[in-house]
């Protein structure tokens, strides 16, 4: 029995084994559009955040998914940003997430930049200068 329905994008009659779309072009309008990529990326990020406990592993922040990031504990094959989450196959994403912990953006920055601790910089203001420009600082202190 032939399927007598219409393409869900352009309404052309479907033939043969076609179930929803009359062509690859119509299928891509739905699955590969920018809006579809955004939806897919947000859904995947939400699912992965839930998989990793739903909150920052350091401070328990859990309000906005835009402020949540995946911190790699070991080797990183690719970033887990929205573009990767929306365009890569799910299996490689899951393998990459297995190497990560969930951190809020603040905790993630603190992990990657421990030398910019505000309390330390307020007590020792020269620490920032020495770390950012070690040669220039060394020359200034020799005078």
Image (cartoon, rainbow, N blue to C red):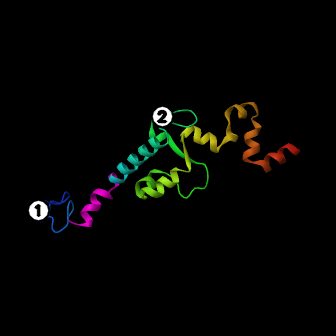
Q: Quadrant of the C terminus?
A: top right
Looking at this view, name the residue that lies furthest to the front. 1
Q: Relative to 61, does residue 79 appear above or below in the rendering?
A: below
Q: Nearer the viewer, mark 1 or mark 2?
A: 1
Q: Main secondary structure of the magenta part?
A: helix
Residue located at (83% from left, 47% from top): 138
Q: Earlier in the sequence, mark 1 or mark 2?
A: 1
Residue 112 in the image: state x and y as whole percent. Answer: 63, 45
Residue 107 in the image: state x and y as whole percent. Answer: 58, 38
Identify residue for label 1. 4
Residue 55 in the image: state x and y as whole percent. Answer: 50, 36
User: Which of 34 and 107 lies nearest the eye of the viewer?
Assistant: 107
User: Left or right of 125: which side holds 91?
Assistant: left
Residue located at (47% from left, 38% from top): 54
User: Per the image, is 13 magenta?
Assistant: no
Residue located at (58% from left, 42% from top): 108
Q: Which residues are magenta?
A: 22-35
User: Per the image, is 26 magenta?
Assistant: yes
Identify residue for label 2. 62
């Amino acid at each position: 029995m032939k399927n007598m329905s219409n393409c869900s994008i352009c309404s052309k009659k479907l033939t043969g084994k076609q179930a929803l779309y009359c062509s690859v072009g119509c299928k891509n309008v739905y699955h590969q559009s920018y809006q579809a990529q955004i939806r897919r990326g947000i859904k995947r990020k939400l699912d992965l955040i839930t998989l990793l406990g739903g909150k920052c592993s350091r401070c328990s922040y859990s309000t906005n998914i835009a402020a949540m990031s995946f911190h790699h504990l070991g080797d990183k094959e690719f970033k887990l940003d929205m573009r990767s989450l929306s365009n890569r196959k799910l299996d490689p994403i899951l393998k990459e997430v297995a190497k990560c912990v969930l951190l809020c953006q603040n905790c993630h920055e603190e992990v990657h930049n421990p030398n910019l601790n505000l309390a330390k910089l307020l007590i020792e203001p020269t620490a920032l200068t020495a770390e950012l420009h070690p040669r220039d600082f060394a020359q200034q202190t020799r005078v």
